Every structure is written in structure tokens, then in C-alpha cells.
Image (cartoon, rainbow, N blue to C red):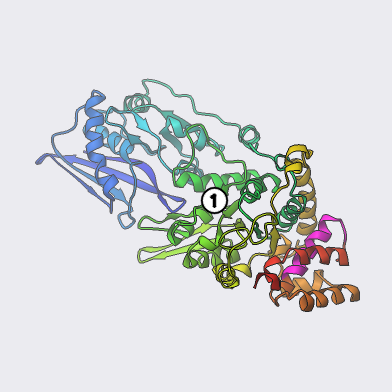
Amino acid sequence: MLAKVFSAGLLGIEAYPIEIEVDIHKGLPTEVVVGLPDAAVKESKDRVRSALHNSGFKYPDEKITINLAPADVKKEGPSFDLPIALGVLAGSGQMAREDFSPFLIAGELALNGAVRPVKGILSIALMAEKLGGKSLLVPEANAREAAIVQGLKVRGIKNLSQAVKFLQGEIDLEPVRVDPDELFREASTYPVDLADVRGQTHVKRALEVAVAGGHNLLMIGPPGAGKSMLAKRIPTILPPMSLREALETTRIHSSVGLLGGKQSLIATRPFHSPHHTISDIALIGGGTKIKPGEVSLAHNGVLFLDELPEFHRNVLEVLRQPLEDGEVTISRATGSLTFPARFMLVAAMNPCPCGYFTDPKRECRCTPGQIRKYMTKVSGPLLDRIDIHVDVPPVKYRELSEGAPGESSETVRKRVEKARRVQRKRFTHSRIHHNAAMGSSHLRKFCALSREGKDLLRMAMSELGLSARAYDRVLKVSRTIADLEGESDIRESHLSEAIQYRTLDRNLWI
């Protein structure tokens, strides 16, 4: 007898429909799974056999052929266990129901018949919505995640027996209901605040300017100056996430299984800080089973690279495409997948190998050659994409012990949002949304300088040894500073502050 059950698979972060056909007929007791299954899918027949026996059902002693269509796309993961088990029961006549077309079913089976959570449920729910709103039968632990997509009937399944009884009409399961707006409000709080950081007033200002204009940022300072602490608070001053951004971010994390058991929506800006030993594949994405890398997990948030010169050069070079395009394309012999990767790059480094070149109280024992070699580990093309370089000096004891708390993240965020609104209005008829993405034509149109401003910038280029690549960056950052101040024109004070944010372009470092 032939039974057909409907499920879904993942290609990257996108879901696609799968028809699971189970054919049972007389012959030697064998099980064959076809349709390009991976090892986890092939092993499902063993999990299904034990789950059926331990749930009070009989596993047929006949020839069983399981086909996963479309047959030309590789199937991965254990999420087909539950639909395969239901197909076996229907095909062997142990279930009264034969028509599964109203339902989309996914779930991994434990040997005792319990249904375990699987990856990518949000993507599957979004696909179900496009297909016309099929009812979803998913693991109970995934039900709230799927229910974020409104208009779907999502039912959480605890075990195989419960799924069978529901499909046969013996019991009724109430659809899981979630209020996305309420869930969004509950999940949109941060555990840290910028007010936690004592001192470092000028660095906090640099963070505000960077966030306001969408500029990438590099912090340079000795160990213990607070670079990591400051970086972790950057998401708290970014504009709040919209529900659309939250769904985008959640879908990426769901596809790699990073959602916690109680977390069904990511409503705060992601902050990812990979170790400097990370490989280029882990950073950008890919692998034998193509999956998103750290740049995609940081989508709509912050990617923090601590100890920047310690990263392998080839790892840093792969950042160039996502920084330019806001997405990353992974190509393999079997095809290409594109993942979103719009993030703010924040990096930190010591000023020299020992870390104390700029420390006023500790002696640096590095030679000029060692410092030059250390600084050149970071490639010029990557530095071209970092608009702001800021020194982070050690915090004085008095500021730690007696300093009053600084501005809260909420206060700074309001100024950032105001500046972002100005930029959205400025670029209404353009594809860009913030100052950091301006091209040459935008610089000529929106960053015109007075005669005094031109003289100041010319003097900075010659006297401070600023490189040619710093010119455009200074103009972009100056435009952002003017936006924060509510000024339509770039003044000399805005230029002066922007010039201070080009530390690595000065002769001091070479």
C-alpha cells in the first residue's frame, strides 16, 4: 500500500517542500530510502523501527520503499523521522487516515517515540504560509517558534502516539497561539548598558558616531583598557530591530540550531565574537553541508573581531565581499547559496606585540620593526572598509572608583535614531540608507566643504601624514557628526573630530 506524507527540507536558510512516499508490499523484509538521503536520513529507518515498537505499533515485516521527492536535491537531517513513521503506519493499515495533504509534518523521533526539536522550523513555517497555510505538526519545543508566522495552525507534538491519535480524530490539539508584538517586546531587552562603562568618554563618542552613520570601527589600545566591554554594548545603541529584521535574524539562527529551548524570537541585535583561530569557512559560511557562517549569524547586528592582527590573513580577506554587498554567496559543485550578511564590523587590537606602546605607565619593549610588522598584519583593503580608528587608553583609577555613571544606552540610542532618520530622508531615492555607504557622487553632493574646511583637510593630509584613502572616510564621518549635531553643513569642528578618528593613517604608527 502506498502512503504520501508532506514535509520540508532546508537549503541554506530557505525551506522547500518534500513529499515522502512510503510503499509497502510483499517481499523480503527490507527498507530502502531513496531521494539522495544523507547518513542522518538513512538512519531514520532504525529510529522509526524502535519508535514504532516502543509506542505500541508493529513494524511491517515486508519490503518498504521510502522515496523523498524531489529526488535530485540532497536531503539532510533527522526532521523526516516523524513523517516517515506516519507514512509507514498509514501504508501498513495501522492508521485510519490516508490523506495527509492538509498537514506539513516535521520532527525527529527518539527511540521511545518522543518527538525531539529540529532545526529551521521558522523557515518551514514561512514556506507553509506561501503554500497557502498548511497546518503544521511540529515538535512541541518548536511550536512557539513556528507560531510566530500568523495565519497558520501550528500544533506541538509530544510523541508519536499523540500524533497518530490526533490525525485519526481521537483527540483534539489546540493550535499554539503567539502574539508576535508581545513576544517582540519581551525579547527586546539587553542585559548590558553603556552606562556600565566608567570613563572613556571620547571612545563612547566614537561609538555613537560609528553607529549613527553605519561606519565600521577599529579600537586600538593596551590590554585591559575596556575594548571588549565597549564593543559588547554597541548593539544596545543601535536602532531597535523591526519585526521583519527579527524574523530574518531568527531564521538564520534557527537554521543552524542556535535557538534555545525557551527562545522563539531574537529581538535584540546579534553580537558575535569569533576567536582569532577561526577558519575562513567558519567565518564566511560553507562546508560540506553548506551552512551560514559568523558573518551571517551577525546579520542585523555586530561582528566583533578581537585581537585583529592575530586572525589569519586569508580569513580577513574573505570579509571584503559581505562588507561591500551585505550578503555572501557560497558556490560549490552542487550549486550556490546566498546568505544575508549586513553587519557592523567592530575590531580591536593592541598597538604593538606586547600591547603597551601607547600605555603611559608601562614600558613597551618592542622595536620599531616589530611594531611595523605587527601593524601590517592587517591588510590595506580591509582597513579601507573601516572608517573610524580610535585610541582606547587605560582607565584611570579615579574614574573607576569615583566617576559618575555615563549616559545610558537609551539616551545615546535616541540621538542615533534621530541621525538615522536624517540619513533615510537624504537617501530617499537611493539604494543606500546611511552615510558609510556613500559613493563619490554622494560625497560631491552631500559633503561640500567651505574654503576653511578645505584648508583644514589639506593641512591634515600634509601635516599629519594622513593617507589618500583617509580623505573619503573623513568626509563620510564628518557628514555623520554634522547629522548628530543637527547641522546641514559640515563645519570645521566636524572635520576636526573626524580627523581624530584616523589613528592608523598617522606617521606615529609607522
Provide residue 165's location: percent of width, then percent of height. 34, 24
Residue at the farthest top position = 170
Provide residue 332's location: percent of width, then percent of height. 38, 65
Q: Residue sitting at 58 percent across and 47 percent down?
A: 270
Left or right of 338: which side holds 380? right
Magenta-highlighted residues: 473-487
- Classify 419 as above or below 469: above
Quadrant of the image containing the N terminus: top left
Q: Judge whether residue 208 is colored magenta.
A: no
Quadrant of the image containing the C terminus: bottom right
Left or right of 280: which side holds 304? right
Provide residue 327's location: percent of width, then percent of height. 55, 61
Q: Which is the main secondary structure of the residues drawn in magenta?
A: helix
Q: Nearer the viewer, residue 349 or 266?
A: 349
- Classify 51 as above or below 293: above
Q: Residue sitting at 65 percent across and 36 percent down?
A: 189
